[in-house]
Image (cartoon, grey):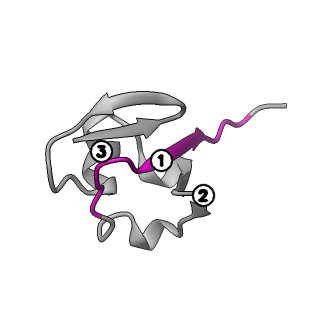
């Protein structure tokens, strides 16, 4: 299936969860904010969100600094 991640089309296996996507990309879910189809999700929902064809994700990595 194809989804859009940060503006780029990506091919993913069917039934991929948001948490699986983050883990496969080496992203610590505690350090990102995810907008799923234009809705910001609480981290507690990442494991229950199953991605579907045409979904739109924006994944923003938080960074520390000064």
Pointer 1 or 2: first along the chain: 2
Furthest toward the top, the residue is: 8
- Quote the CA–CA distance across marks 2 and 3: 18 Å
Q: Earlier in the sequence, mark 2 or mark 3?
A: 3
Marks 1/2: CA–CA distance: 7 Å
Please identify the quarter of the rendering in which residue 21 is found. top left
Tell me which segment is drawn in magenta.
Answer: 50-64
**Residue 19 part of the magenta segment:** no
The residue at the far front in this view is: 54
Question: Which quadrant of the rendered structure holds the C terminus?
Answer: top right
Predominant secondary structure in magenta? Answer: loop
Badge number at residue 2: none
How far across and how far down the image is residue 15, in percent? Answer: 16, 56
Q: In the rendered view, would you say 24 is above or below 30?
A: above
Q: Is residue 17 above or below residue 7?
A: below
Helix, strand or loop under label 2: loop
What residue do we see at 30% from left, 66% from top? 47
Residue under pointer 3: 21
Q: Nearer the viewer, residue 30 or 59?
A: 59
Q: Which residue is mark 1?
A: 56
- Residue at the spot 60% in from the left edge and 58% down from the top edge: 38
Q: Which residue was labeled with disc 2?
A: 38
């Amino acid at each position: 299936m194809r989804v859009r991640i940060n503006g780029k089309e990506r091919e993913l296996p069917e039934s991929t969860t948001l948490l699986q996507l983050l883990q496969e990309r080496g992203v610590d879910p505690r350090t990102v904010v995810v907008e799923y189809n234009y809705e910001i999700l609480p981290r507690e929902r990442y494991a229950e969100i199953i991605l579907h064809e045409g979904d739109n994700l924006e994944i923003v990595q938080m960074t520390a600094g000064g």
